[in-house]
Image: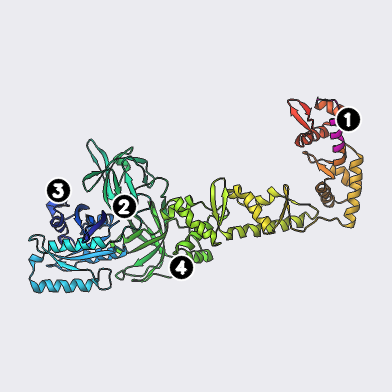
Amino acid sequence: MKRVIVGTAGHIDHGKTRLLEALTGIDCDRWAEEKERGITIDLGFAHLEERGPDGEELQIGFVDVPGHERFLHNALAGLGGIRIVLLVVAADEGVKPQTREHLAICSLLEIPHGLVVLSKRDLVDGDLLELAQLEVAELLEGTPLAKAPMLPVSSTTGDGIAELRRALVELAAKVEPLARAQQPFRLPIDRAFQLRGLGAIVTGTLISGEVSTGDTLAVLPGGPSARVRSLQVHGQERKQALAGERTALQLTGVDLGGLARGEQLAEPGIFAETKDLCARFQLLAEAPEAIKTFIPVRFHLYSSEVVGKLRPLGGEPIAPGESGLVEIRLSQPVVAVRGDRFVIRRPSPAATLGGGAIVDPRWRRRRGKALRDALESIEDRRPALELWVLETGERGATAAELAPRLGCRAADLGAELEGLTKDGRLLAVESGRGRRWIAPAAVKRVMERARVALGAYFDAERLAHGMPKAQLLGQVLPSRAGDLADVYLRWLVAEKVLVADGDQVNLPGRRATLSGDESGLSKKLLEWIEGAGLSPPSPADLAAELGAKQQILEGVQRFLVGQGKLIRLPAGLLISAAAVERLRQELADSDIEEFSVAEFKDRYQLSRKWAIPLLEHLDSVNVTRRVGDKRQIVRR
């Protein structure tokens, strides 16, 4: 069965509600005030089931939209998901202000199909009917409804109703399936109310996916979760509702206070709320002036209405009749994805300014070159994905983090990201948080930082055999990308930015070498420390004894440590590696099983200043093992 939603549009009191009653037998005016005043204040709903020309079953749902300007926000709430518009113009009155505004809104929302109905045919003669037809035809020139069939009808006499029903069925049979039908479930709430004994009820049009009894749904933005106890489609109990159907859901787990028009029910974990958007915006030709900077607006997205402000991006104003990329900042969050259509109205005096489509529902504010680059990329899907990955920096992004912008599942987006990886546009890595995608530009930044950091380090530490790996990674990687340190290190090695050796890194081909004076100093230093055995002099005593500048001496000491000839103990003291090796061998050959710090000091005639750091070093290289106040010798 094909499912199609039809919406009415037109000026107040032009016969929209009576027309739907004549077509379906259902009176869409639900409230006593509506019946007393003879006008539609809130949304009304009706339905019709027919067979198309080829015998296919058609389920046609109708949304009766209020025509009065004061109730236009209610009208906008009902226009989401509509595939066919019935533009209703009373033959005895012709085109009126809300006729023009509703037509403009339907164009902005890109409702793909339409029929034009000249209502109240019984109130005019042939000449007036022909005049009304000419006026409407002139109005429709240059609009999506320019070639739409125009049918005169009378809801009172029934004249033309059968022909209208036939034309509507033929058009509904041609309507393309919803592009979002296979995407995750999403339903903007246009009504929420309580029925005694049943609890909270919400209604709306499924714009994507499907919903079944028993499903758990998220109430967005920022609401609780709710479970579907039962559902109806056009008043009939069902187990499941599909995209394109008008649906009523009975919910549990949430009370009426947690539900309101403008919120959305959605598959959990897919959609995200936002207050900053980038969009392609069309300013109506009837707009009073160009938009040059921020202006206050009312933002209409499906059933939500939020105040905010809008400004052009790129530095150029948007003139009436023209379009451009804009930034929209909202006072309250909405749920939006790329491709959603919206309408912008001026708060006061109230008027429709324009509308368009969202291109980035989680817009990040930029300036200068970053803004220009973003505006060049954001409207095409693949470059937009690359941009979104790039803005996550060195950490990269998972498919689950990117999917809310597109309103799709992570698994579906993953295949698209793999395609960008295959084309060399993105890099893919495995991490503890799953598969991530990183922009090549982010990797390039890390490489440039690494070259600079290595160069600066070895300029200052000319005699160092290498730079500590952790120190380098701490300088070139932000903390949020810390779990990718090994990945980046492999890339840096593969691109010959550095070579890695244990816990140190070095520039390719670089070796630390001593000058003649430094070579002589190192020989004296090594002889002095080795001659002192397990109790060498302090660094200050060494500097005084050797008559060397402190900075030069420290460089030579680091050089000898790097060569493995000296060992730097935990307290910063230096000792000969040969002396420590002799100590290790003696302990291994002895029949001692364990000893205390005092016994160790006495045996080797050491002060506590040397005994404690030396034992900590022996623990660290697994020569001894600390057990309480004792040390055990580790037998190999």
Q: Nearer the viewer, mark 2 or mark 4?
A: 2
* Disc 4 secondary structure class: loop
Q: Nearer the viewer, mark 3 or mark 2?
A: 2
At label 4, which amino acid type do we have? Answer: Gly
Q: Nearer the viewer, residue 339 or 490?
A: 490
Q: CB atoms at circles 4 and 1 under 8 Å apart? A: no
Find disc 3 in the rendering and name its residue: 32
Find disc 2 in the rendering and name its residue: 243
* Residue 381 sits inside the magenta stretch: no
Find disc 1 in the rendering and name its residue: 605
What is the spatial separation of the Cα atoms under label 2 and label 4, in whole angstroms?
A: 37 Å
Q: Residue 388, image x and y in percent?
A: 50, 57
Q: Residues within 10 Å of mark 2 (few under 14, many from 20)?
A: many
Above or below: residue 50 compared with residue 259: below
Q: Residues within 10 Å of mark 1 (few under 14, many from 20)?
A: few
At label 2, which amino acid type do we have? Answer: Ala
* Disc 3 secondary structure class: helix
For the point 25% across and 65% down, the residue is: 103
Q: Residue 538, image x and y in percent?
A: 85, 41
Q: Nearer the viewer, residue 542 or 243?
A: 243
N-terminal of the pair, mark 2 or mark 1, is 2
